[in-house]
Image (spheres, rainbow, N blue to C red):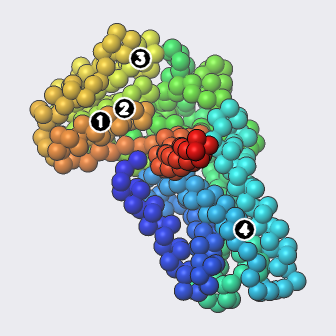
Amino acid sequence: MSKKVVVSATIFVLAHIIFVAPFVPIANMLPAGLGALSMTSMALTLVLAARWRVVDQLMGGPDKSYVAHRWLGFFALVGALGHWALASSFGSGALPMLAESGESVGTVAAFGLIIMTAAALVRAIPYHLWKASHMLMGPIFLLAAYHTFFVASPLAVGAAPWTLMATVSVFGLIAWIRTLLRKYKPTRLVKVERVEHFDGGVDVTLRADKALPPFVAGQFATIAHNRARAETHPFTIAGGDETSRRFVVRAAGDWTDDFVRKVSIGDEFRLGRGVGRFLPKYSDSRKEQLWIAGGVGITPFLACLERMEPDSAARITLIFCIRSRASAGALKDVERHAARLPQVDLIVLHDNIGDRLTEGRLADLIRTMAVAAHVYLCGPQGLQALVKNVWSVAGMRGRIHSERFDFRGAYGISDLLYVGNPVLNAAQQWIAERKGLNHAVAGS
């Protein structure tokens, strides 16, 4: 987690407390600010979940929206728990007859957020149950809004914080309705035309009877079984023509495990349109680029290679990190395209024989590249961290483009540890000091 993220998160939290401070007594400043933080965060998670195109564009792509969604969920929980622990009744409320119920409803909303967070963090919970728990955010948000407006509170009706909460409540409600309606968005019926298994995954081609909406190489699309209320899962498009789409899927969860084991020619699925902003440049007007793929992270680059024609424009270096040839989906196609495209330098690294991408190896390669070259990176977090560190140390000015889709990572265990470690260290130090003091007293 970067310092920029930490600073932005700190500013976001403090802004709510500072905004509320002039309108409440000092004793109520912190709980009121934390309550506002929780409400704003919940509303924004609903706005991001609604998948409005303009919002995704402002965020820099759907994957950036997912990351922000996780962080906002974390703020919603922390704000709610802090407010619940510190807040106390003040005055008679906007409608005194509803003040007591407002307090009870707030407790239910706080418990709901705790349960949802637990469901998000425990990967053993099946995907469909995890997804269903997230759909409860709308009702929990409505309960929190009821608590906000009817509990005995120091915030005066019509004051700036009250108006803000009213505004975010309206936007949150609209976004939740949009999310419910989005489940009925149009998809296309497709049939499995080709199936090619590899170790740990499957390479499939789906075909429709009519032309599919066009896609840009690097985008992803959702796949769902052809039945009512079926779960949708996003996968990067590995290629295709007007009526077909190719996907390389690795077994990495309950849905994908089942898909990899059971998919066969003739199966029917529902296919969504291509979306996303991870778009490697492959036209002859491009600048020099470094493409790095880990495992099935090769899929966006495979779609680009499929559309490329031989040229003498800027160089593209493609590093494909695999466990072994048997576990590398579409490796033969990648090698075939690289052989016909003189502008592409392909480097395949085999982990099973100790041939890995190290910091030193990457640094040596980067030194041969233009300082303004761009990186397109699709792979696990460890690989992304290595590349970003080496790129920064080398003083490269070009941007690193990456996508992050970890639906079951919740806020990210590593993120939680990063935030929580200082607190844990302080607690351990306090306990150690207390133990030392007790021993000293006992010894005297």
Find the distance from the CA under tag 2 to the CA under tag 3: 13 Å
Would you identify the image quadrant in which residue 371 lies? top left
Find the distance from the CA under tag 2 to the CA under tag 1: 6 Å
Labelled disc at residue 144: 4
| Residue drawn at (46%, 36%) of the image | 237
Q: Earlier in the sequence, mark 3 or mark 1?
A: 3
| Residue drawn at (48%, 30%) of the image | 246
Helix, strand or loop for disc 2:
helix
**The disc labelled 1 sits on which kind of residue?**
Val
Would you identify the image quadrant in which residue 155 lies? bottom right
Q: Residues within 10 Å of mark 4 (few under 14, many from 20)?
A: many
Q: Earlier in the sequence, mark 1 or mark 4?
A: 4
* Residue receiving disc 2: 383
Taking depth in this image into account, of 175 and 53 the one nearest to the observer is 175
Labelled disc at residue 323: 3
**The disc labelled 4 sits on which kind of residue?**
Ala
Helix, strand or loop for disc 1:
helix
Q: Are marks 2 and 1 in contact (CB under 8 Å)?
A: yes
Q: Is residue 338 above or below residue 381?
A: above
Find the distance from the CA under tag 4 to the CA under tag 2: 40 Å
Q: Earlier in the sequence, mark 2 or mark 3?
A: 3
- Rendered location of residue 335, percent (x, y): 30, 19
Helix, strand or loop for disc 3:
loop
